[in-house]
Amino acid sequence: MPTIAMRDPIPGDWTDWHRMLSENCAHLGVSMSQAHDRELWRRIMAPEHPMGALVCGTSDRDGTLLGLAHYVLHPHTFSSKMVCYLEDLWVEPAARRAGIGRSLIEALVARGKEQDWSRLYWHTEADNAAARTLYDRIGRATNCVRYDIVLP
């Protein structure tokens, strides 16, 4: 059984990371400009920025990345500790159901314990049955309803 290796991205991961970001955007029906892609990568690579990422692959592959997690750290009204919002979780379709999504979330949980975060949370579409199969096993669904106001 191959080992799943989690780590922070490095500059040489751009090509694989960008491929997965593009696939995730297509899945979500959104598009981002090349400038936006580059700015997102800059934020992820900047240690002082609250946005971060984890990437992963397996020990039996040629170094190609198979998954990513984008997250944002932020303060919270009801805690003096930071809170982590898991903004994107993507696993290559051919690599799904191999524990990569779970491993990415577990790596963020471990990081949160090391860095003394208050909690980790995320959103998903109500009809995303594949993702919710995993999420229902490792997290607790809340009764919150999200509202958005798009600003020009």
Image (spheres, rainbow, N blue to C red):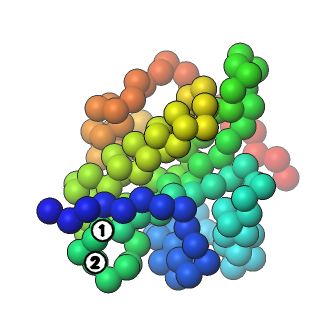
Residue 61 disc label: 2
* Image height of 37 relative to 134, above or below: below
Q: Which residue lies under the disc numbered 1?
A: 58
Q: Is residue 17 left or right of residue 149?
A: left
- Disc 1 residue type? Thr
Residue 96 versus residue 73: which sits nearer the camera? Answer: 73
**Looking at the image, do the residues carrying marks 2 and 1 touch, with CB atoms under 8 Å apart?**
yes
| Residue occupying the point 61% across, 78% down | 11
Res. 26 in view: no
Cα gap from disc 2 to disc 1, whole angstroms: 6 Å
| Quadrant the N terminus occupies | bottom left
- Which quarter of the picture shows residue 127? top left
Label 2 crowd (10 A; few <14 / some 14-19 / many >=20): few
Secondary structure found at label 1: strand
Label 1 crowd (10 A; few <14 / some 14-19 / many >=20): some
Q: Is residue 10 left or right of residue 76?
A: left
